[in-house]
Amino acid sequence: MALLEIKDLQTQFFTSAGTVKAVDGVSYTVEEGETVAVVGESGSGKSVTAMSIMRLIPWPPGKIVGGSIMFDGQDLLELTEDEMRSIRGRDIGMIFQEPMTSLNPVLTIGLQLTEPMIAHLNMSEEEAMAKAVKLLGMVGISEPERRLAQYPHHLSGGMRQRVVIAMALACDPKLIIADEPTTALDVTIQAQILELMKNLTRDLGVAMIIITHNLGVVARYADRVNVMYAGRIIESGLASDIYHRPRHPYTLALLKSVPRMDRQRTDKLDPVDGQPPDLTKLDGGCSFRPRCRFAKDHCAESFPVLEEIENGHTCACFEKENLAKEIKEVVG
Amino acid sequence: MNEVVTPMRNATNTGSSKGFDEVLVDVRNLKMYFPITEGVFIPKVVAQVKAVNDVSFKIFRGETLGIVGESGCGKTTTGRCILQLEKPTAGEIIYGGDDITKYNSKEMIEVRKKIQVIFQDPYSSLNPRMKVGEIIAEPMSVHKIITDPVERRKRVLYLLNVCGLASAFADRYPHEMSGGQRQRVGIARALAMNPEFIICDEAVSALDVSIQAQVINLLEDLRDEFNLTYMFISHDLSVVRHICHRVAVMYLGNLVELADGDELFDNPMHPYTRLLLNAVPIPDPDVEKQRAHEIIQGEIPSPINPPSGCVFHPRCPAAVDGCNKNIPKLREVKPGHWVACSEV
């Protein structure tokens, strides 16, 4: 059984401008110990999916209106707020993008790091402090004892993100959700943090969902990839399937939009025209249709469902069989 | 004179830039130190942040020069000095044969017509209370380029069109537009003056991948159409490789390597450049599996009290005994390939 199984998740925001279907029927699984990436552009619903798993969607205006999230044998959507609180930060750790805002500026590192252990694991303050020292050492922070007494503003951005990772690991979680964990960091610090996360999750056997817009980060670290567009997963599979044998026109467009550092300057980028759709004004058809260069008339009739093309590689496109050859030519 | 000066004194120094031989901007020994003061009534300078420390390079007409580096390396400050938004501590910036650091604000007005800037954040660089048409028309009326409002309006619509926006956007406000559309407005505003030189400071960094690619293509098309020269400041090395003819790498206020784009990315020589390129993930799982992931240790030291000798030596895997004492000079190792490292 998978560690996490999301089925037909629907999260909507009820705003004065209309109902925003931020997540519209998302399903995916995470096995124990594996790293799954969710990629997509702003507004594709990747972060809202993560917040839904943690049940952190603010009401009003947001609400999970349908679906199920099975984690370790129980449906998170059926739990009471108290039961959910005992899972957050304990069985599921979370790493956010902004290490500046996800730490409390007026509390010491030590207090913030020991709080989850005291609350969830009934540790005494001394035990928690001893474990905090160990955790800081594990994430590569020098002089951990001295750091415990310091405040977040004493640390650099990379150091703060290391503290956030230590906090996520504090209660030996089974799953860590990392939402753009390195987007705010410089590229050399990004490499340090990602390498650290990869080694820790492998050594400790923790599963990870990494949410990012950076296709390079995904290529370097993820086992499986889910590509999201306008609130839905439109393609899913092993990283090598997604990068070398993409079948959805949007995945193809994304890959053709990213400049690659290992390519000569003369290579032209080939982005899709237009912009992502307004999520309050979706019609029944394929939401990528207006920007799709392969769109046919029947694409407007209904939304294509995710169907398996080959072992574990799924794609939501009516034309996926016909496009196999054409896309192969473009990918080269 | 130390050798760092030679690159600018020697006319052939960056000659490998194919087809570009007319020097447009010549930055010579630029230094920008920001004082740190203590005391409220009688401020006393207690230290200096050496944001840019003796940097020299040339920009040729028609080329795109990339300036890359991490936060705090001085790339943006260098751009601001060229725009004369900062008064450099020392050094010369030769533009059109004159040292513009000596210009007063009145003389600068003429230069500013030719140099424009595109900023990173399309949300804060457009006035939210002005319509898009007014934003683009403002520089033309300020500099009295086009005084007739009807003609000005015509040019606004033309510029919107050139940047891929419908004419209807002229009467909208920035908040009605997406990030990519706003950045196009920023580009249209920069083009309004018919500039010859545009400084793009992280111009595409805030945009989503597919929108970023659209804007990159637009910048390239405009460069060809209007014969523009860009100084492209960015931390995103993949974008820089894609758009720049030549690339300069900065670290802690110093220029450490300068070469033709393809040469720099295929054959980096400075240890910092090598590690920096190694840190950039390539969107291809097979390529990534084969790359050796060499991680640069530690963090960037404070520019208030930079390391002695070569500023990179505390983090450098190739450092030897002398590196903490001798300041390496930028020297030409191959035609057009300049490196500031004694061990290369």
Image: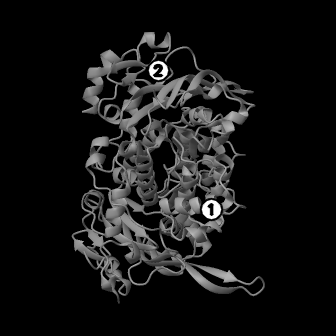
Please tell me which residue lies in front, B136 or A234.
A234
Residue B53 in the image: state x and y as whole percent: 46, 78
On what subunit does the disc labeled 2 rest? A
Contact between marks 2 and 1 (CB within 8 A): the answer is no
In the rendered view, would you say B279 is above or below B57? Answer: above
The quadrant in which residue A57 appears is top right
The residue located at (64%, 86%) in the rendering is: B45
Q: Is residue A95 above or below residue B9?
A: above
Residue B66 position by quadrant? bottom left
Residue at left offset 48%, top offset 41%: A208
Please, which chain is the residue tagged with disc 1 on? Answer: A
Residue A318, x across and y down, in percent: 40, 14
Residue at screen point 31% across, 63% down: B274
Residue at numbered disc 2: A289
Q: Residues within 10 Å of mark 1 (few under 14, many from 20)?
A: many
Label 1 sits on a secondary structure element that is: helix
**Image side of residue B295 versus residue A110, left or right:** left
Question: What residue does disc 1 label?
Answer: A129
Residue B264 location in percent, x, y? 29, 61
CA gap, disc 2 and disc 1: 55 Å
Residue occupying the point 41% across, 54% down: A195
Residue B62 in view (yes/no): no
Residue type at mark 1 is: Met
